[in-house]
Amino acid sequence: MKKISFSFLVALSLIVLASCGGKQEPAAEATTETSAEASGPVTLDLSAGDDMKFDKTEFTVKAGQKVTLNFHHTGSLAKEQMGHNFVLLKEGTDVMAFGQAAMAAQATEYIPEAMKGDIIVHTNLIGGGESTTIEFDAPSEAGNYTFICSFPGHFASMKGTFVVE
């Protein structure tokens, strides 16, 4: 086997660098935009399981943007035992008061009639292995909106922030 000289390796490296322009292009940055147009429609995916946790705790969208939310229950328990939903609340809503009122709203899938005015949008309650999809317009005003699961006791650990820019 022949030895390759150090100067040969340096010369070869310089040739390769020169043919590439001597620099690397930066990698494309990851983005949360799902469409080329910032105000175009966006699809969001959210999951929750029997561990009473959302797989994401923050979404960022543009004011007024069309949103499709695909919500999946990845657990195995029925909705009567471990139901989940997505409830997007208006800014300034008292989450504790809403969660407490929801506990008494079994007949309406834990959406309290008296507090419907505090809700921007919500999904149906789903059980293990089920999915649901809703479409809505993001709020027209920028801000941080809270989303929760309103099944009894879940709102304490199943909540997140829906950021509108």
Image: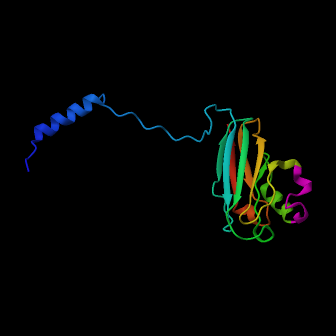
Position in image of residue 71 (x %, y %): 71, 54
* Colour scheme shown: rainbow
Q: As drawn, is 153 to the left or to the right of 39?
A: right
Residue at 85% from the left image edge and 61% from the top image edge: 109
Position in image of residue 156 (x %, y %): 72, 62
Asked which quadrant contains residue 25, the reply is top left
Instruction: Give the residue at the far left of this rendering.
Output: 2
- Where 98 sits versus 121, above or below? below
Position in image of residue 62 (x %, y %): 68, 36
Q: As drawn, is 162 to the left or to the right of 19?
A: right
Does 157 appear in magenta?
no
Residue at 68% from the left image edge and 67% from the top image edge: 75
Viewport quadrant of the C terminus: top right
Q: Nearer the viewer, residue 149 or 50?
A: 50
- Where 9 sits versus 37, above or below? below
Residue at 32% from the left image edge and 32% from the top image edge: 23
Residue at 68% from the left image edge and 33% from the top image edge: 40
Asked which quadrant contains residue 9, the reply is top left
Position in image of residue 54 (x %, y %): 66, 59
Does 110 appear in magenta?
yes
Q: As drawn, is 133 to the left or to the right of 46?
A: right
Q: Nearer the viewer, residue 95 or 135?
A: 135
Q: As drawn, is 100 to the left or to the right of 33?
A: right
What's drawn in magenta, residue-wise? 104-116
Asked which quadrant contains residue 49, the reply is bottom right
Q: Nearer the viewer, residue 92 or 161?
A: 161
How many numbered marks does the figure carry? 0
- Where 51 sits versus 92, above or below? below
